[in-house]
Amino acid sequence: MSVDHYENFPVASILLPSRLRPAVEAIYAFARSADDIADEGDATPEQRLAALSAYEAALDRIAAGDSGHAPMFERLAQVVREYDLPLEPMYALLSAFKQDVVVSRYQTYDAVLDYCSRSANPVGHLMLHLYGAADEHNLRDADAICSALQLINFLQDVAIDLQKERIYIPLEDLNRYAILPGALDQASARPRWRSMMKFEVERARALMLSGAPLALRLKGRIGFELRMMVQGGLRILDAIEEAEYDVFLHRPKLTKRDWLNVFWASVRMKRQLKRVARVA
């Protein structure tokens, strides 16, 4: 999942084994601060890109085995050594943050998925490496879950992103439903908008469900944490539907009651796995 998803899924920090918390905190500090460089403050695009390039240089120094890092990167270097983490996912995150500085529109769904593969999927890869579960099958399903969470976040935050002059809904979809990008905030009450958002919600749900078996395969806390994330994402999609897709008037978010429902849905996912195993 991308760093933006921690608002929707705060349970992740509660379920983390204590032994992994320092490692996750080090990775999160790196990702969160880099994301802030791309998004926050009054820096120029050139200044943002330069700062992100400095982060890349710091990763280069970790890869080379250098010492004398700044405190945040020293903690990250220790985690990389201790868990033998790959640096490629961290470089991928930085490439996505750089892209946010210079790209504000995406022509196709494939282009959005490519962005997700660098803005969201790397976090899933790193978590699987921390848990020692980063095989090809798991990584593939994690990619589906993380990309789906990112897409759900985009649908949830259409209005917020528009204030930043960004549109993550593919332009090909807007064109297909005859919705002008320049009039996006005026489209929410129109049947064409609801039809398009219904399509986007169904596609994101299908992607999430395609990766959901990973949450049933993984044992222990990581499995339950992932089931909570899957069910939380699905609940956000339900909330978008219940709001009749008007994410401008009402930004869907999880309430305490929603989290209770998410918890029990996560428990039932595990029971479903046991029933399947008995039948097999």
Image (cartoon, grey):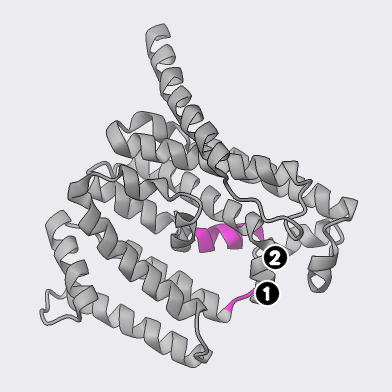
Residue at disc 2, secondary structure: helix
Residue 40 point in image, percent of width and height: 50, 80
Residue sitting at x 12%, y 82%: 68
Question: Which residue bears the numbered disc 2?
Answer: 159
Q: Is residue 56 left or right of residue 67?
A: right
Question: Is-magenta flag for residue 82?
Answer: no
Residue 111: within the magenta? yes
Residue 215 appears in view = yes
Q: State how far apart marks 1 and 2 are (Cα).
A: 6 Å
Amino acid type of the residue tagged 2 in the rendering: Ala
Q: Residue furthest top?
A: 279
Bounds of the magenta segment: 103-116
Q: What x and y, as percent, mark residue 99?
A: 51, 75
Q: Is residue 119 above or below residue 16?
A: below
Q: Nearer the viewer, residue 113 or 212?
A: 212
Q: Which mark is residue 187?
A: none
Instruction: Determine whether label 1 and label 2 are within 8 Å by CB.
Output: yes
Q: Is residue 68 above or below residue 170?
A: below
Q: Residue tagged by mark 1?
A: 163
Please state if 23 lies on the left or on the right of 195 as rendered: left
Splitting the image into 4 quarters, where does residue 134 fall? Answer: top left
x 52%, y 63%: residue: 115
Q: Residue at x 41, y 24 (%)?
A: 270
Q: How many marks?
A: 2
Comparing 275 with 263, the one in front is: 263
Give the residue type at disc 1. Answer: Gln
The structure residue drawn at horizontal position 25% and vertical position 60%, both measured from the top left corner, is: 86
At label 2, counting other C-alpha atoms closer than 10 Å, the crowd grade (few under 14, some 14-19, many 20 or more) is many
